[in-house]
């Protein structure tokens, strides 16, 4: 299974709480292109994958997306810890606070809760890999948008790390399209 180390994949040490930024960063947890949907997408797709090499890529990336989800949750938590009622009201965090207090809840920046259709698992290798590549690019764009709006280096560093990992995942899914399953006319691996 997995060996879990009790540390984040990349350190998150935010010194200054900022609930306004938490409200937008949380989209990478529970939004349509966030880490929760990505991890569930890849870890779900792997079960129907008849090609071991691609199954391995889906497992690796899906597991890493869980680590990214953990980083985003740590960021949101650190940005909302120990807020006073005045800070909650002044920041516009009050609408979130009423329903979730300062708990990390999977929701998009727009306020729409996470939805199962974000998973997008079709069961067809070509459709799924193209969906996966598109999902990685949409996540990269979301990170680009967050980076444009944020100037705190404590927040920017982990966001830039996560953005770079989306690029690597896109490349890995592109490589998966070039593996031997595609070279042999789509015939399944005998070891699957």
Image: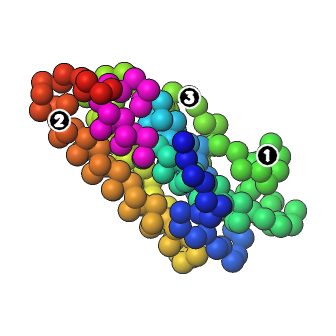
Q: Which residues are magenta?
A: 45-60
> Which part of the image, by quadrant, shows the C terminus?
top left
Q: Which color scheme does this rendered protein use?
A: rainbow
Going by the image, does 187 lie left or right of 143? left
Which residue is pictured at 65% across the width and 61% down the height? 6
Q: Nearer the viewer, mark 3 or mark 1?
A: 3
Comes first in the chain, label 3 or label 1: 1
Q: Position of residue 105 (x, y in %)?
A: 70, 45
Of residues 84 and 131, the one nearer the viewer is 131
Height in image: 125 above or below 67? above
Total numbered circles: 3
Which residue is pictured at 59% across the width and 63% down the height? 8
Asked whether residue 46 is drawn in magenta, I would say: yes
Going by the image, does 112 lie left or right of 33? right
Residue designated by label 1: 100
CA gap between label 2 and label 3 equals 32 Å
- Determine which of the numbered discs, if any, sits on residue 116 in the image: 3
Residue designated by label 2: 180
Q: Position of residue 14 (x, y in %)?
A: 65, 73
* Neighbour tally class for label 2: few under 14, some 14-19, many 20 plus, Cα within 10 Å: some
- Determine which of the numbered discs, if any, sits on residue 50 in the image: none
Q: Position of residue 160 (x, y in %)?
A: 44, 67
């Amino acid at each position: 299974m997995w060996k879990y180390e009790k540390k984040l994949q990349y350190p998150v040490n935010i010194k200054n709480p900022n609930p306004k930024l938490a409200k937008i960063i949380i989209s990478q947890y529970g939004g349509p292109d966030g880490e929760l949907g990505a991890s569930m997408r890849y870890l779900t797709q792997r079960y129907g994958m008849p090609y071991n090499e691609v199954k391995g890529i889906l497992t690796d990336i899906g597991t890493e997306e869980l680590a990214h989800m953990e980083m985003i949750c740590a960021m949101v938590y650190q940005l909302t810890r120990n807020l006073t009622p005045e800070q909650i009201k002044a920041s516009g965090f009050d609408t979130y606070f009423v329903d979730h207090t300062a708990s990390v809840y999977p929701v998009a920046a727009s306020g729409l809760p996470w939805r199962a259709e974000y998973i997008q698992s079709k069961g067809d290798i070509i459709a799924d890999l193209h969906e996966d590549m598109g999902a990685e690019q949409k996540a990269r764009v979301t990170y680009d948008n967050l980076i444009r709006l944020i100037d705190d280096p404590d927040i920017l560093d982990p966001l830039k790390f996560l953005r770079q990992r989306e690029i690597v995942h896109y490349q890995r899914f592109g490589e998966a399209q070039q593996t031997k399953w595609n070279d042999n006319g789509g015939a399944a691996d005998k070891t699957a």
